[in-house]
């Protein structure tokens, strides 16, 4: 019996790695791959897969938004969450019919998740799957969502979702907030140290003494001279940032490399 699944992750290399690992299981068939939450919801409702691999951290809407939008389906899929950060309530995931895997993927952990999915599909009724999905929603409802920060714009104070921040840079005694399209001046926080405490520590990384960046918006990176790394961000200007030598080890750890 074929078991259909959809891979949902905004990073193509992650999807390719997962697809390669899944190719070792003849009963698993990947019927679609999606790179955003909005496309994922449409694809899930169109294909009605048995289960999905769902990235939690994606630009814009998150994996939790996908769960919310598919919870009322007649045949909701089982969910294996993908995450690079362990600050999420992974203990809650393990107690449910769904599962999670951490990046970088391992074959043994993936096999454990697949065995769990197959057991549920073969031994439970659809209404139990629906019950477990509802349970998951209740468990994750208390997880802290992206904080908002205050920024100045045309003489007014705006509240900006931290998930929209590509990077923050300290210059000329001010902190400038860069999103994919616009730039703002931070209001109410005057040091990067204080800003780091306010932001989600799992998503943001201090790459330089004057720069804090959102790991979810890194487009590409490469080793640079003197042990530094050069990054290209996914904003309209494809801004180049630097990871200083003393921060490279932590950077590699956060990316699982």
Image (cartoon, rainbow, N blue to C red):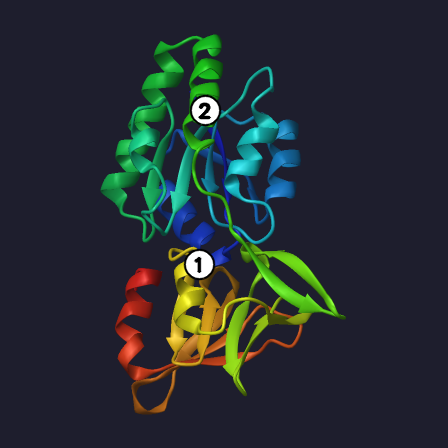
Q: Residue at x 33, y 61 (%)?
A: 254
Could you say whether the residue bearing mark 1 is in a helix, strand or loop?
helix
Q: Residue at x 31, y 32 (%)?
A: 113
Q: Quickly name the residue at label 2.
A: 138
Position of the N terminus by quadrant: top left
Q: Of marks 1 and 2, which one's residue comes earlier in the chain? A: 2
* Residue closest to the eye, 25 or 222: 222
Whether residue 164 sits left or right of residue 29 in the image: it is right
* Residue closest to the eye, 23 or 104: 104
Q: Quickly name the residue at label 1.
A: 198
Q: Viewer-nearest of labels 1 and 2?
A: 1
Residue 185, how many percent across, how many down? Answer: 62, 73
Q: Is residue 158 above or below residue 174?
A: above
Q: Is residue 80 above or below residue 86?
A: above
Q: Are circles 1 and 2 on residues that touch, CB within 8 Å?
A: no
Residue 169, how many percent across, how many down? Answer: 51, 77
- Place residue 80 in its image quadrant: top left
Q: Residue at x 65, y 71 (%)?
A: 184
């Amino acid at each position: 019996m074929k078991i259909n699944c959809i891979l949902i992750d905004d990073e193509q290399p992650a999807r390719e790695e997962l697809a390669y690992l899944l190719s070792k299981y003849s009963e698993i068939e990947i019927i679609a791959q999606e790179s955003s939450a909005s496309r994922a919801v449409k694809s899930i409702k169109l294909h009605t897969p048995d289960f999905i691999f769902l990235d939690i951290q994606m630009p814009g809407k998150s994996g939790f938004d996908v769960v919310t939008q598919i919870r009322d389906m007649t045949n909701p899929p089982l969910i294996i969450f993908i995450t690079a950060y362990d600050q999420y309530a992974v203990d809650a995931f393990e107690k449910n019919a769904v599962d999670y895997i951490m990046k970088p993927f391992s074959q043994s952990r993936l096999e454990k998740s697949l065995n769990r999915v197959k057991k549920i599909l073969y031994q439970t009724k659809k209404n139990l799957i629906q019950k477990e999905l509802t349970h998951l929603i209740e468990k994750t409802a208390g997880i802290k969502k992206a904080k908002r920060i205050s920024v100045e714009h045309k003489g007014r104070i705006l509240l900006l979702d931290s998930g929209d921040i590509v990077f923050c840079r300290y210059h000329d005694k001010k902190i400038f907030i860069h999103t994919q399209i616009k730039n703002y001046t931070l209001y109410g926080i005057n040091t990067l140290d204080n800003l780091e405490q306010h932001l989600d520590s799992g998503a943001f990384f201090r790459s330089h003494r004057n720069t804090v960046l959102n790991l979810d918006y890194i487009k590409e990176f490469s080793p640079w001279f003197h042990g530094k790394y050069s990054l290209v961000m996914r904003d309209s200007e494809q801004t180049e940032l630097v990871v200083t030598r003393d921060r490279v080890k932590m950077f590699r750890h956060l990316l699982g490399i």
